[in-house]
Amino acid sequence: MVITFKSGKVIATAHELVVRLDGEHRVTLQAQVDAIQLIGKGANVISANGSECKWSIKLDDEQQLREIANEIGCDVM
């Protein structure tokens, strides 16, 4: 599943989440689903914290977060 937000795209599968940011540097963030935490209640943040990665990114709205949660099988906090 691909979700577009104002800064790029989120590509979600059952096992992995990839964030591709727009702009000249074309940054890509990647994490296994086990390392992902979804923070709602107005924050609308994807947080990845694992032994191999640590990053977070803010989405445009909570609906995008809920779509990702449904795809990866994770609850929104």
Image (cartoon, helix red, strand yellow):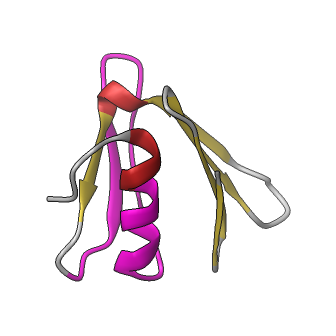
Residues drawn in magenta: 42-68
For image coordinates 32% across by 72% down, the residue present is 44
Report x, y in % for residue 47. Answer: 32, 49
Residue 51 image point, x, y percent: 31, 17
On screen, residue 62 versus residue 2, left or right, reads: left
Frontmost residue, 72 versus 57:
72
Which quarter of the rendering shows the C terminus? bottom left
Judged left or right of residue 77, residue 43 is: right
Q: Residue at x 79, y 67 (%)?
A: 23
Q: Is residue 29 rendered to the left or right of residue 55?
A: right
Q: Specify the farthest residue to the top.
A: 51
Q: Is residue 1 magenta?
A: no
Residue 9 percent location from the top left of the image: 67, 61
Q: Quadrant of residue 36?
A: top left
Closer to the camera in the image, 63 or 55? 63
Residue 34 in view: yes
Is residue 58 something that shows in the picture? no
- 45 in relation to 28, above or below: below
Q: Is residue 58 magenta?
A: yes
In the depicted structure, whether residue 8 falls above or below residue 17: below
Rendered location of residue 45, percent (x, y): 33, 64
Q: How many marks?
A: 0
Choose top left, top right, bottom left or bottom right for residue 18.
top right
Report the front residue among 33 and 53.
33
Q: Give above or below for 49 relative to 68.
A: above
Identify the residue shown where x is 79% and y is 53%. 26
Picture residue at 52% right of the left edge, 31% below the top: 16
The residue sitting at the right extreme is: 24
